[in-house]
Image: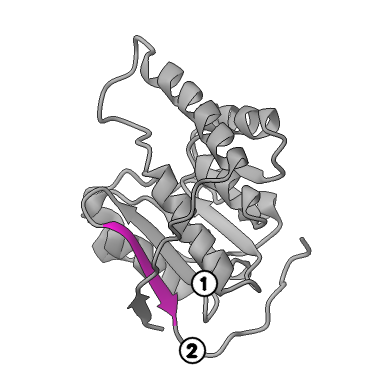
């Protein structure tokens, strides 16, 4: 099923105090991570524009108040997951790096945010990557067990998926979402050069809730 791009106008209201406090805590965590002697610039985790992400998610929350479940692919330190929780989403993240899973759980706990981070791949086991995408430059782990069992959910249980793909990964992410997400679901991606991009999967919604949540 095709994905239809659409525009979202980020909210321009001042950031709430809770968001400011959470982003300050997240920045402290990120600064410590990048200051490690073993860290190599440009390798591994790279943060997105968290304020822009919050403003975009807030606009979606305002315009689509019925949306409830949000999933971040490659959730890193869980900052986007935390921002989604602050907006009232039932927020979850999938991250393959165990050290980042632990760090994100600490950050969320410090700010008393209820969210779930599962370790594994966000590529569903039953949705293999198409052969043509294996030749692309990618940082995505394509062959690890997925984390959906830990979440007790399937990809099509989420109305919104957020991801920060490497530039050559956008087509891969869109393909996975188009094949696995429910109709009407929204894929948000962040690009350092293009900002936020939004796609909606068109078609009729299918029956949801294949796993209890």
Number of callouts: 2
Q: Is residue 142 visible?
A: no
Q: Is residue 170 visible?
A: yes
x and y percentages locating residue 66 in the rendered image:
66, 74
Q: Which quarter of the image is occupied by the N terminus?
A: bottom left
Q: Is residue 194 left or right of residue 111?
A: left
Residue 80 bears which disc, if any? none
Q: Check if residue 57 falls in the magenta segment.
A: no
Q: Secondary structure at mark 1?
A: loop
Q: Secondary structure at mark 2?
A: loop
x and y percentages locating residue 151 in the rendered image:
67, 52
Residue 151 drawn above or below residue 33: below
The residue sitting at 45% across, 60% down in the picture is: 11
Q: CA distance from mark 2 to mark 1?
A: 11 Å
The answer to which of marks 2 and 1 sits earlier in the sequence is 1
Residue at mark 1: 181
| Foreground residue among 194 and 103 | 194
| Foreground residue among 10 and 2 | 10
Answer few, some or many: residues within 10 Å of disc 1's Cα (few below 14, many 20 plus, some between 14 and 19). many
The residue sitting at 49% across, 34% down in the picture is: 97
Which residues lie in the magenta part?
195-201
Answer few, some or many: residues within 10 Å of disc 2's Cα (few below 14, many 20 plus, some between 14 and 19). few
Residue 203 bears which disc, if any? 2
Q: Residue furthest top?
A: 37
The residue sitting at 39% across, 67% down in the picture is: 9
Residue 66 drawn above or below residue 204: above
């Amino acid at each position: 099923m095709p994905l239809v791009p659409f525009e979202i106008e980020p909210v321009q209201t001042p950031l709430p105090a809770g968001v400011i406090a959470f982003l300050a805590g997240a920045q402290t965590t990120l600064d410590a991570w990048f200051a490690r002697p073993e860290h190599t610039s440009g390798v591994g985790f790279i943060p997105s524009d968290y304020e822009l992400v919050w403003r975009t998610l807030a606009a979606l929350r305002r315009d689509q108040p019925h949306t409830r479940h949000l999933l971040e692919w490659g959730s890193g330190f869980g900052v986007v997951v935390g921002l989604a929780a602050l907006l009232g989403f039932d927020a979850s993240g999938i991250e393959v790096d165990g050290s980042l899973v632990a760090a994100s759980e600490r950050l969320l706990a410090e700010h008393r945010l209820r969210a779930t981070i599962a370790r594994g791949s966000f590529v569903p086991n039953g949705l293999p990557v198409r052969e043509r995408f294996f030749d692309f430059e990618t940082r995505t782990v394509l062959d690890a067990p997925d984390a959906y069992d830990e979440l007790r959910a399937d990809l099509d249980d989420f109305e919104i998926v957020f991801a920060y793909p490497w530039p050559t990964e956008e087509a891969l992410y869109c393909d996975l979402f188009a094949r696995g997400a429910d109709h009407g679901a929204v894929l948000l991606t962040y690009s350092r050069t293009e900002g936020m991009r939004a796609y909606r999967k068109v078609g009729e919604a299918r029956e949801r809730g294949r796993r209890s949540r």
